[in-house]
Amino acid sequence: MSLKIGIVGLPNVGKSTLFNALTRSHGAQAANYPFCTIEPNIGIVEVPDERLQKLAAIISPEKIVPAIVEFVDIAGLVKGASKGEGLGNAFLSHIREVDAICHVVRIFDGGDIIHVEGSIDPKRDREIIEAELIIADLDKVSKKIQKIEGGARSGNKDLNKELTVLSALKVALDAGKLASTVVIDKELQPILKDTQLLTSKKMIYALNTDEKSIATMPLVEAKMKAGLLDSDTAVLVSAKPEEELIELSPEDAAGMLKELGIATSGLDRLIHGAYDALGLQTYFTAGVKEVRAWTVKKGATAPEAAGVIHTDFEKGFIRAETISYGDFISLGGEAKAKEAGKLRVEGKEYIVKDGDVMHFRFNV
């Protein structure tokens, strides 16, 4: 599975600048005026994982294939977007297609950068965007309730279950809460997923600060500026200086980040935050043809992990020959791990661990 993240925020908060930094390109136009992004920009980014290089150092494969994340830079929303203000609500449809939302919130002052609201207020800005998403979801839920109410009252059990979920969502949305805050019974989770609400998606906040503050501002302080809870997933970024590094080699860029006092890039922090928020992990396949990283849900079984490679692998799953990443590296590869008794033969019930090096046996 590949991960798709939509970047949203008010105009001129640094969305396109962050997109350019993440994708190491100038694919997104960044300008000092609202709505410089109209059509969504899309960029494919490799997931940084030093474990791939360490595996490759042992195997010397023909190629190395990292996991990827697709970033979508979506046009800036404004107050009233759900009612057609600014560029209208057509762009909300782009958000429905992503797995998670990266909400860029500007927390730096910088008077030379135009703000669509005329002043800097991170909490207000965050709430404007979330309100528009909530309004759009509320409209969708209300229309769906009207459509199925009659059938639910007539005794249709499936529609009754759907109405139960939609009614709970409507109560939360009416109160200005995100759909993701609604607790739904496990058996009704598929119904919640089918609603495809904007605010049911995982939200990762990219708190965009200036070059001076990135190395000194604690994340907790940045979250307070944006009115976030401790439990909210957020990363502190400084989009502009990171964008300026895209002309440099990865090694030189890392050196410059170090000079700025930034231990890891915004890309690293954002992707790791997204993986944590979405409950994702990585396993590897490793052979002379290629060493490759695969993204899978935490808690996935071995057949489900095999299915990420190809559906036939899951359908015809027989077993998974598995070595933990630590054992593979410390023992110097598959052959020595097998000699040491560290290669395990796992069946259909095995729960994949982060870093597992796996080889699937299947029959179709």
Image: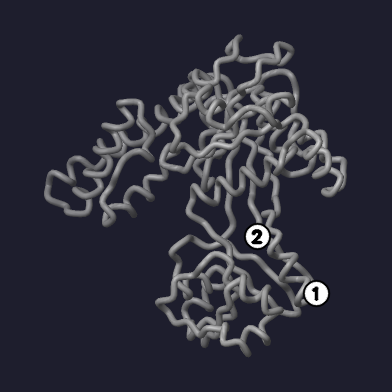
Marks counted in the figure total: 2
Mark 1 crowd level (few <14, some 14–19, many ≥20, 10 Å Cα): few
Residue 72 has which mark?
none
**Quadrant containing the N terminus in the rendered view:** bottom right
Give the left or right position of residue 60, taking residue 284 as reference. right
Q: Amino acid at mark 1?
A: Glu
What x and y, as percent, mark residue 303? Answer: 47, 75
Dot 2: element: loop
Rendered image quadrant of residue 26? top right
Asked whether 230 or 202 is in front, the reply is 230
Q: Which residue is mark 2?
A: 67
Q: Residue furthest bottom?
A: 339
Residue at mark 2 to residue at mark 1: CA–CA distance: 17 Å
Q: Which residue is mark 1?
A: 62
What x and y, as percent, mark residue 22? Answer: 71, 42
Give the left or right position of residue 69, taking residue 184 as reference. right
Q: Residue furthest left?
A: 154
Q: Residue at x 75, y 80 (%)?
A: 288
Dot 1: element: loop
Asked whether 17 or 299 is in front, the reply is 299
* Sequence-earlier tag: 2 or 1: 1
Mark 2 crowd level (few <14, some 14–19, many ≥20, 10 Å Cα): many
Q: Amino acid at mark 2?
A: Ala
Q: Residue at x 59, y 14 (%)?
A: 120
Rendered image quadrant of residue 121? top right
- 83 versus 41 height, above or below: above
Asked whether 146 or 191 is in front, the reply is 191
Give the left or right position of residue 84, taking residue 150 as reference. right
